[in-house]
Image: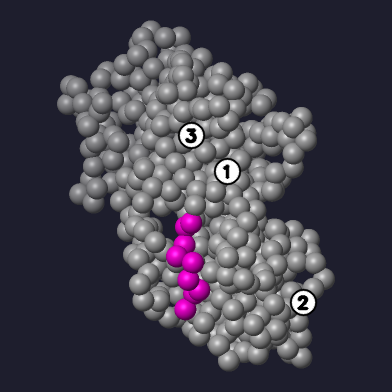
Amino acid sequence: MSSTHASHDHGDDRAPVVRHTDVAIIGGSAAGLAAALQLSRQRRSVIVVDSGTPRNASATQMHSYLGHEGRSPSEFLKIARAEVRSYGTEILTGRAVAITRDADAFRVELTGGHVLFARRVVAATGQTDEFPRIPGLAKHWGGSVIHCPFCHGYEARDGRIVALVTSPAGLHALPLLRQLTSRLTVVVHDGVSAADPQLATLADAGVQVIAAPVDEILDDDEGRLRALRMADGTEVPADTILVGTRLHARVEPFAALGLTACEHPSGIASHVEADSVTGQTSVPGLYAAGTLAEPMLQVLPTAAAGARVGAMVSFDLAEEDLRTATRPVAHAADWDARYRGGPIWSGNPNGALIAEATGLAPGTALDVGAGEGGDALWLAEQGWQVTASDISQPALDSIRVAAEQRGLRVNTLRADANTASPFGSTRYDLVMAAYASIPRTPDARGVANLLNAVAPGGHLLVINHDSGDIRAAVEQESPDVTHPYDHEAYVGMDDFVTALTASPEWEIERNERRDRPAGAVSTRHVHDVVMRARRAG
């Protein structure tokens, strides 16, 4: 894979970045992540853009999700993100500002000025809730104010549940609540006639029904829900309030494509019309997944819907590639586009390479993720027989031209470190990877391939950015800025160390955190981590 050589930086690290991917997924909750998992397992490059504002963020637990029952939404997202990233999918924290279409791809403009080009787009932005205008109601949302008896009704069992009706749809769940508690009160705030037959049926069954407007939600001295204060001043005690919200489909990023939301048959939501099987919208190549298309879904079926749409997009891309007789290499288009734009790095070798390789007897060397070849060319000048490997052909072409200009011999090899035997059967005295962006795989195939390429008695040299620096920079980033890369989707130093320590034939000679080389301009990458290991002879 390609490298991002820290000591080769030549400009502001906050400058707009252009990325390319097979599929851009807008929205990183259950539907978006499930779609990403399906696609990444089909070896598609996927980038998820997530604003970090899931609809269920205020809830402490989610329910009726087999295998995740009672888990917090935040913990669920943590697990789901790790699973998606384990296949090399990137999750960018930020927002899609606008999405347009040109001749060959969708153009996704991100906060911070970055741009993402994608062959397909999955809209998984979900819904936002509009609460009834009753003071004090919204503050308890996700706690003692709930919207679904299946999601949180069991936790309210046997308590004082008040069903707050604000529309005809609010009558739908009332029979369910009688099974949860004998202390049910129905308050008809507005939107339903007091003479509605279902209210009479409830009253006949012993349920207290109050048809009057609510002025305010009252708390006790500790801030817990206590009661509803009616317009006439009376109070209705409550431990839990079940209320329906008005749902609004998040379609703003897709407006330029002509995608609009329409009224859902439920009468309480807007949604995007999409094919019930494929998720295809009225815009070719744009798919809708999850509650954006189906507003009433719980988390489990939302994830299922996302998985279904991810599979359909996989079929769509596969059929297109079959018609054009192409078999794209995942992630290659992203790197090819970058290197076609001209020099990215300074051309100088990395300082950590010079420090670690000086003193080693020159032999055969493999530079994995060679980029434009600054390290490979330096090794050749020191007498090494160098093979420069990269996933990007334009990068390798740059190396070939530079080597010819300097009168050096450098072999080039286009290879994906995550394929089977990418470097052939040859083993090298030195295998190095400087800031190589190798997407994760669950079996850590890329790490194993690098280790296997080292000859007995040879060395492995890995140079990387300190992930702690990157994580801290992203966490401190303004919500209006999207960090254009996700380092957690790529193999890190810990992955190499874990593999090396598990094998008795390896000795780690050095594993250090160092200040970055003088002259580097990136403010995000303050330190490097350098690891050198030797394979037993």
Say above or below: 464 vs 188. Answer: below
Q: Badge 1 local density, few (<14 within 10 Å), some, or many (20+)?
A: many
Residue at the left extreme of this rendering: 233
What amino acid is at disc 1?
Thr
Q: Which residue position is annotated with label 1?
A: 21
| Quarter of the rendering occupied by the N terminus | bottom right
Q: Position of residue 100 (x, y in %)?
A: 46, 28
Q: Mark 2 points at which residue?
A: 427
At numbered mark 3, what does the secondary structure look like: helix, strand or loop? strand
> Who's the residue at 42% across and 37% down the image?
109
**What segment is highlighted magenta in the picture?**
343-351
Tell me the residue at 75%/82% (across/down): 455
Which mark is drawn over residue 107? Answer: 3
Give the quarter of the image for residue 536. bottom right
Tell which residue pokes out farthest to the right in this image.
425
Percent x, y of residue 172: 49, 21
Height in image: 202 above or below 235?
above
> Picture coordinates of residue 29 (x, y %)?
51, 43
Question: Dot 1 lies on which element?
Answer: strand
> In what element is the residue under mark 2?
loop
Residue 488, percent from left and from top: 52, 60
Q: Which amino acid does label 3 sit on?
A: Arg
Label 3 vs 2, first from the N-terminus: 3
For label 3, count other residues whose C-alpha is less than 10 Å away and answer few (under 14), some (14-19) or many (20+).
many
Which circle, 3 or 2, is nearer the viewer? 2
